Amino acid sequence: MAEVINTIGRRKTAVARIYMTPGNGNITVNKKDYKEYFPTAPLQFIVRQSLEVVDALDKWDVKANLDGGGITGQAEALRMAIARALCEANIEDRPALKAKGLLSRDQRMVERKKPGRPKARKRFQFSKR
């Protein structure tokens, strides 16, 4: 088993860089406890999801640096980074994580604004006269 596992996860414009070490389940995000950084229960569930799937919630300590995007994108980027690190630690966990869709990058991003339009696809109101 490796000493420190370093992986990256992305979602929208959020990037999560994590350092996972054997420990007792402490998750630190930008030098704060994850429950302080992600105050709502659904976001805390998303962060823990990868660890709960392989029943490793109290076996690893995670230190994460989050950057960019919003709070939901950051939580989902962190979930992906943790899932990738768990695969690196134990390859037998891969099928369980893959079945839940935790290893695939969600590539949906905001479409860029086009010139001559108010938003990406919206048109200005058409006037016949």
Image: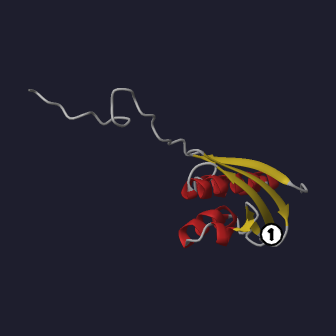
Q: Which residue is more in the foreground, 85 or 10?
A: 10
Q: Position of residue 39 (x, y in %)?
A: 59, 71
Which residue is label 1 attached to?
59
The answer to which quarter of the image holds residue 90 is bottom right
Instruction: Please identify the quadrant where the N terminus is shown.
Output: bottom right
The residue that appears at 58% across and 44% down in the rendered structure is 13
Instruction: Reply above or below: 48 against 109.
Output: below
Q: Position of residue 58 (x, y in %)?
A: 77, 73
Q: Position of residue 94 (x, y in %)?
A: 70, 53
Local secondary structure at mark 1? loop
Badge 1, how many Cα within 10 Å: few under 14, some, many 20+?
A: few
The residue that appears at 55% across and 71% down in the rendered structure is 40
Instruction: Please identify the quadrant where the C terminus is shown.
Output: top left
The answer to which quarter of the image holds residue 66 is bottom right
Left or right side of 29 for 44: left
Residue farthest to the front, as pictured: 129
Q: Which residue is more in the foreground, 22 or 70?
A: 70
The answer to which quarter of the image holds residue 118 is top left
Q: Position of residue 98 (x, y in %)?
A: 62, 52
